[in-house]
Amino acid sequence: MTSTKPNIDVEVCESMPWLVDHCYGWQFGEQGVLIELCRRLGIDRGYEVGAGDGDELPVTLDFMRHLTLYEIEQDKRGKLRVKYPLATIHGAYEPQHATLIKAESCVIVDIDSDDLAIAEEIAETAAPYVMMVEHYDRQAPWMATPGVMLEPDQRVPDWLVGMSLAHGFRIQQPWQVVQESLGDFGYRIVALTRVNGINVHKSQLEKLCQ
């Protein structure tokens, strides 16, 4: 990974230096990276697990022809239907939903909890071209605390995942764990921010590294 332009907290893959020019927008520069990856790979189908009420939906998905959103809270689903009337909107994501996801797509997992478990299901079942998966905020406390309880493989124990901390933080898997796991499913991280890793499936890397 290599650092990008000042004031944008994104690191990009050394073999894709052109991504530097596309680090902008929501949330820490991820928006522009996703838009450009989807453009170059011809992706017009997007999925987001944990869409919220749409106010913080990565606007990269606004231009998708086919948009599928998962949101567990009913009132937020109502707002999503108003804002995205052409989208397919579901309640809580369930494991069987992974079989409905197309490979030629961009998938975003953002549930402020066990994002990795869902990402692993989707990666194994659907292998979407692009996946953005949320991890524990790299500038948050707790992970750096001596003696913090982690599993031998450095994963956060299941009973801790999703627990609320001060200042709005929730415990999630650290980015190193997320990226190592997705690597086992054939993904390579191409951009890393405070809270998200953007990954491309190995089958599509050659198209991006030219």
Image: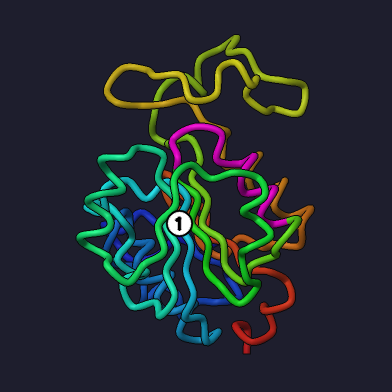
Q: Which residues are magenta?
A: 111-123
Which residue corresponds to the image point at 27% horizontal and 67% vertical from the top-left? 85
Task: Answer few, some or many: residues within 10 Å of disc 1's Cα (few below 14, many 20 plus, some between 14 and 19).
Answer: many
- The answer to which of 29 and 102 lies nearer the viewer is 102
Amino acid type shown at disc 1: Glu
* SS type, badge 1: strand
What is the quadrant of the C terminus in the image? bottom right
Q: What is the residue that sits farthest to the top in this orientation?
A: 147
- The answer to which of 156 and 59 lies nearer the viewer is 59
- Place of residue 195 in the rendered image (x, y in percent of width and height, measured from the top left): 43, 44
- Place of residue 44 in the rendered image (x, y in percent of width and height, measured from the top left): 47, 81
- Place of residue 170 in the rendered image (x, y in percent of width and height, measured from the top left): 41, 26
The image shows a total of numbered marks equal to 1
Say left or right for 189 vs 5: right
- Place of residue 207 in the rendered image (x, y in percent of width and height, measured from the top left): 64, 87
Up the image or down, 60 lies above or below 140; here it is: below
What is the quadrant of the N terminus in the image? bottom right
Could you say which quadrant of the image residue 98 lies in? bottom right
Magenta residue check for 68 = no
Q: Which secondary structure dominates the residues rendered in magenta?
A: helix
- The answer to which of 84 and 198 lies nearer the viewer is 84
Up the image or down, 130 lies above or below 43; here it is: above
User: What residue would you read off at disc 1?
Assistant: 48
